[in-house]
Amino acid sequence: MSASLRRETVLYAAATTVSGLVMLAVLPFMSTALTPGQAGEVGSLRSIADVFGGIAVLGLPAGLLKYWQDGSTDRRRLLLMAILLPAAACAVLAAALIPVAGSVAGLLRLSSPGLLVHGVLLGAATALVQVVLTIYRGDGRAWSYFTIQSARGIASVLLLAILVWEGISGVSTFLLARWAPALAAAAVAAVMAVSFSRSGGAPPNGLMRFSLPLVPAGLALLVLSSADMLMLRAMDIDPSESGFYEWASTAALALTPFTLGFGMAWQRHIFREGRPDYDALGRSSLRFILVALEAAMLLALASPEIVSIVGGEEYLPAARVLPMLAGANALYAFFLVAQTGPMLSGRTWWIAFVTIIGAAANIVFNARLIPLFGATGAALATLGTNMFMAACLFWLGRKSFPVSIPVMLPLMIAAMCLGIAGQPPLVTRLLIAAGGTAAIAWVLVLLRRASS
């Protein structure tokens, strides 16, 4: 990776880590100030906010990065669009929700339809802060991004602590503590961005044509991330299976900051001015995939010991789920890189098409595999779906971002095989870890020599 790509990946990964730590910091307040029923209401409203925000961003982050990098677009106009378009989408969505607010509140078993206001505000705030901070990503201001996101998270915890300390608790308090700092962060970020958003240049014609197909893709990814748990809970199987899956999913989150951090940094680099350097992009993406595969391999191989030490005897069945989710995370790294071809060619509808098909396939796989294998079946469905989506996008984008099939195919198969990595005896797993690490290190050294 280039120095700037490494730096930005680390900072975006750190910002993601801070967000995760903030969520952990909220748990003690939730445990003492909310009943389990109220906590469920918070979770339901957060899901509403995720869908609301996922639509309101209008797929703009990728489009803003593309046009910010072309060197001829009016950046001040881009900043204005980054503020006004999500705000307008939020207004339209909120107006559409009003007539059915009572029905939605009843479906989600909310104590009051008025709580939906907080869900809407959280979705709007999340969308605005995500889109406005894309301007910082486009300008390579990873430190500023990290600072704003960290300050937002710390402010959220402090506000919640103050409200609970003052005796102001309840579902609305927990949501207020999230959307108010997010709106403030979006406002501060927008004002600060004016200083480095030059006016003058061509209008960003085609921005929405490029961005809008990514909206269904984003919603399909939400389905992918939630279908397994929902179907585990809904199907007539042992309820503890969903607990094993939740435990393994939480453990697999250790791999997420690096993957998401790279994904956030990668788009700016593929859209840089001039013709892309395909050799440099290929080497950088292969390094990322190898490091992601190494981390997933170590987690998968160590899963029996991790579950035994951290989870205890009650959660030992999670050891058969964790390796598959580690492999799925590695294949998601392939999926991020595979989007490069459609992004460079402007055919973002390919990403939407493949992701929607993947979400539908995931539901079918879950429906078939969960009754047979429980949590392991849900993890296998995720593993297979990520493999399918990555392979499809590599194939569709091969003309815009050619990849070496003899290189990528064995690596993807290796990621799939991580699903059974926790089964061999400890000595065998140690040998696999040593051999795999040595092989990956050797390839990374070759890539470094090729770069120099």
Image: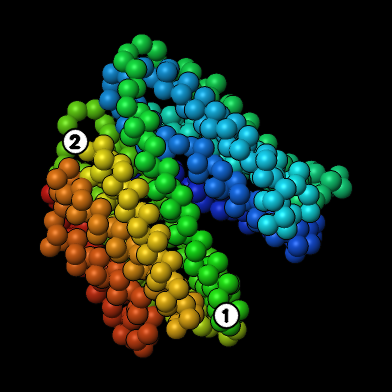
Residue 143 visible in the shown view: no
Residue 417, image x, y percentages = 29, 75
Q: Is residue 383 visible?
A: yes
Badge 2 is on which residue? 276
In contact (CB < 8 Å): disc 1 and disc 2: no
Look at 49% across and 28% down and name the residue there.
85
Write down the quadrant of residue 210 in the picture: top left
Give me the residue at 51% from left, 61% from top.
Answer: 226
Report x, y in % for residue 156.
67, 43
Name the one closer to the observer, 214 or 80.
214
Q: Which mark is residue 408?
A: none
User: Which residue is farthest top?
Assistant: 200
Relative placement, left or right, of 414 versus 14 is left
Give the residue drawn at x 33%, y 74%.
Answer: 418
Q: CA distance from mark 1 to mark 2?
A: 52 Å
Instruction: Identify residue type, mark 2.
Output: Pro
Residue 203 occupies which quadrant of the picture?
top left
- Where in the figure is residue 230, as x and y percent of width and height? 55, 66
Q: Is 298 located above or below residue 193 in the figure?
A: below
Label 1 crowd (10 A; few <14 / some 14-19 / many >=20): few
Q: Which residue is mark 1?
A: 236
Q: Quadrant of the C terminus?
A: top left
Mark nearer the N terminus (1 vs 2): 1
Secondary structure beneath dot 2 equals: loop
Q: Is residue 266 above or below residue 91?
A: below
Q: Amino acid at mark 1?
A: Asp
Label 2: few (<14), some (14–19) or many (≥20) C-alpha neighbours in 10 Å:
some
Instruction: Give the residue at x 25% y 53%.
Output: 393
| Residue 90 rendering spot, x and y as whole percentages | 57, 34
